[in-house]
Amino acid sequence: METTEAIRRIHEIIKMLRSDVRTAILSHEVMEAANEVVPNGMAGIRSEFFDTYGAVQNALALKLAMDLARIFDVTVSGRFPIAEQDKASIPVLAALLDRSDVREHFICEAAHWFRGVASPGVSREASFEAMWVAVGKVNKERRNKDALACERALDDFAALAVRLRAEGSDEADALGRVRRFRNQRLAHSLFDKEPEKCPRYSDLSMLLKAAMNATELALFAVEGQNADYSEIASEQRRNAKGFSLSLVRGLKLSSARQRHRFRRYRIQPGQ
């Protein structure tokens, strides 16, 4: 595969990965907020709508498992080299970023992240020339720092990718359970191949954290963009917590009305 094609694929993968990770974060934070608010808020109160609440939580957990299986999707086969697979996933991205020509390209690109500010009526070329004259030494140091920062991000991304596939690592074990569950139960119903070990909820949280970290590193190395998915998760948690509090108020109101109807129409002893 030519370098230009590898770079094109990387940009396409990152564009889709950015969206997929945000969607996965939303599902996770909605579940976490509900688990934090609803059981405590409804303690000692019965509601006819608990089955629906449970179904929604279960659906979100299954969706998150499917999202993560897609984010880390890869076909392990000699017939299909990982770097050539048409999957917008972290393993495919890791295989592409591991190429020496690709690494060199993005490290060189990082040296140009610091751009001059064009002045009105002054051409871009003239503005750059003025910048070089005014801040030559400072600019050179900044360019070197940006290149080194990009290289470190690529190294950290590669180290995370290794942990995800290292036999016996927590991440690899969790990913194995999620993949088997997706292949044998979510995507297909294989009656003779039920997954031996279903994913744990902690598996989903661990893999989501890894996906957030990997995407942040990739965005920085490739685009020079500082993304903070922890802040995005916090914002979504606040929103989801507000929704869950409203849900508790609604469930309490419906339960109170249900008890009132029961008392109103209950047949009294002796009637």
Image: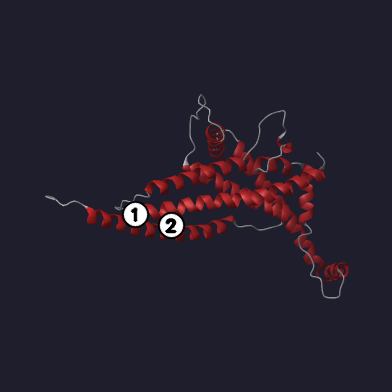
Residue 27: which numbered mark, if any? none
Q: Which residue is mark 1?
A: 42
Q: Residue at x 50, y 60 (%)?
A: 239
Residue 34 horizontal side relative to residue 147, left or right: left
Residue 86 x, y percent position in the rendering? 71, 39
* Residue 228 vertical position relative to residue 54 in the rendered view, above or below: below
Label 2 close to label 1 by CB (< 8 Å): no
Instruction: Report how many numbered discs are placed on residues in the image.
Output: 2
Q: Residue at x 35, y 54 (%)?
A: 40
Identify residue type, mark 2: Ser
Residue 82 x, y percent position in the rendering? 70, 36
Marks 2 and 1, how far apart at CA: 11 Å
Residue 242 x, y percent position in the rendering? 45, 61
- Classed neighbour count for the residue bearing mark 2: other residues with Cα under 10 Å, few (<14), some (14–19), many (≥20): many
Q: Earlier in the sequence, mark 2 or mark 1?
A: 1
Q: Residue at x 57, y 58 (%)?
A: 232
Helix, strand or loop at label 2? It is helix
Q: Which residue is mark 2?
A: 244
- Classed neighbour count for the residue bearing mark 1: other residues with Cα under 10 Å, few (<14), some (14–19), many (≥20): some
Q: Nearer the viewer, residue 161 or 12?
A: 12
Q: Residue at x 41, y 47 (%)?
A: 52
Residue 31 x, y percent position in the rendering? 47, 50
Residue lying at the far left of the rendered structure: 270
> Residue 119 falls in which quadrant of the image?
bottom right
Q: Nearer the viewer, residue 265 or 115?
A: 265
* Residue 240 vertical position relative to residue 205 in the rendered view, above or below: below
**Quadrant (top left, top right, bottom left, bottom right) of the N terminus:** top right
Residue 9 horizontal side relative to residue 33, left or right: right
Residue lying at the far front of the rendered structure: 271
Helix, strand or loop at label 1? It is loop
Identify residue type, mark 1: Met
